[in-house]
Image (spheres, grey):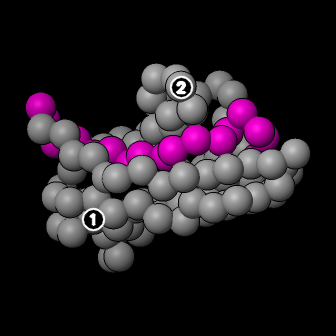
C-alpha cells in the first residue's frame, strides 16, 4: 500500500481544512489508519486513528478533528475545524497491517493568527 497525502495549506485560526490520504491499494484490508502531526522542532504525534469503525483522538483535537474513510475511493480523510496555531505542522497518514506499517509523505498545515 502506498499512501499519498494532500490538502494542507495556509489557513487563519478558527478556519478549517480537510486532509486526504489516498491509498494505491485497498484500505479495506488494513487493520487501521491514522493521522500524525509533527509540529516544527517536535516529535511526530498521533492525533487521530481509525480501527474498523472505532475512532480515537488526541485530547487536544477532540471535538475539532474528525477522521473518516471512503473505502470505494481508498481514501482516508481528516476534517480539521476550529484550527489553532498549535495545529501548525506536517501531517502524515499512516496505515498498518499486522506488523507492517505504511507512511505517506507529509502535507503541511500552517495556521496563522
Tag 1 residue: 23
Res 57 seen here: no
Which region shows up in magenta? 83-99
Is 79 magenta? The answer is no
Query: Between marks 2 and 1, how big is the CA–CA gap?
Result: 28 Å
For this orientation, the residue located farthest to the front is 41
Is 89 magenta? The answer is yes
Residue at 72 percent of width and 33 percent of height: 86
Q: Nearer the viewer, mark 2 or mark 1?
A: 2
Q: Position of residue 56 (x, y in %)?
A: 51, 34
30 versus 8 height, above or below: above
Assign the N terminus to one quadrant of the image.
Answer: bottom left
Q: Position of residue 51 (x, y in %)?
A: 36, 41
Query: How many marks on residues?
Result: 2
For this orientation, the residue located farthest to the left is 99
Q: Nearer the viewer, residue 25 or 4?
A: 4
- In the figure, is residue 45 to the left or right of 3? right
Helix, strand or loop under label 1: strand
Q: Residues within 10 Å of mark 2 (few under 14, many from 20)?
A: few
Tag 2 residue: 41
Helix, strand or loop under label 2: loop
Residue at 70 percent of width and 59 percent of height: 10
Amino acid at each position: 500500500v502506498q499512501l499519498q497525502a494532500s490538502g494542507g495549506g495556509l489557513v487563519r485560526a478558527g478556519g478549517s481544512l480537510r486532509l486526504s490520504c489516498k491509498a494505491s491499494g485497498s484500505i479495506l484490508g488494513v487493520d487501521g489508519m491514522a493521522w500524525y502531526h509533527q509540529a516544527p522542532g517536535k516529535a511526530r504525534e498521533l492525533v487521530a486513528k481509525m480501527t474498523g469503525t472505532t475512532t480515537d483522538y488526541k485530547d487536544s483535537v477532540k471535538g475539532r478533528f474528525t477522521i473518516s474513510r471512503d473505502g470505494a475511493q481508498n481514501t482516508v480523510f481528516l476534517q480539521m475545524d476550529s484550527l489553532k496555531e498549535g495545529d501548525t505542522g506536517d501531517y502524515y497518514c499512516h496505515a498498518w497491517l499486522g506488523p507492517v506499517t505504511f507512511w505517506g509523505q507529509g502535507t503541511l498545515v500552517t495556521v496563522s493568527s
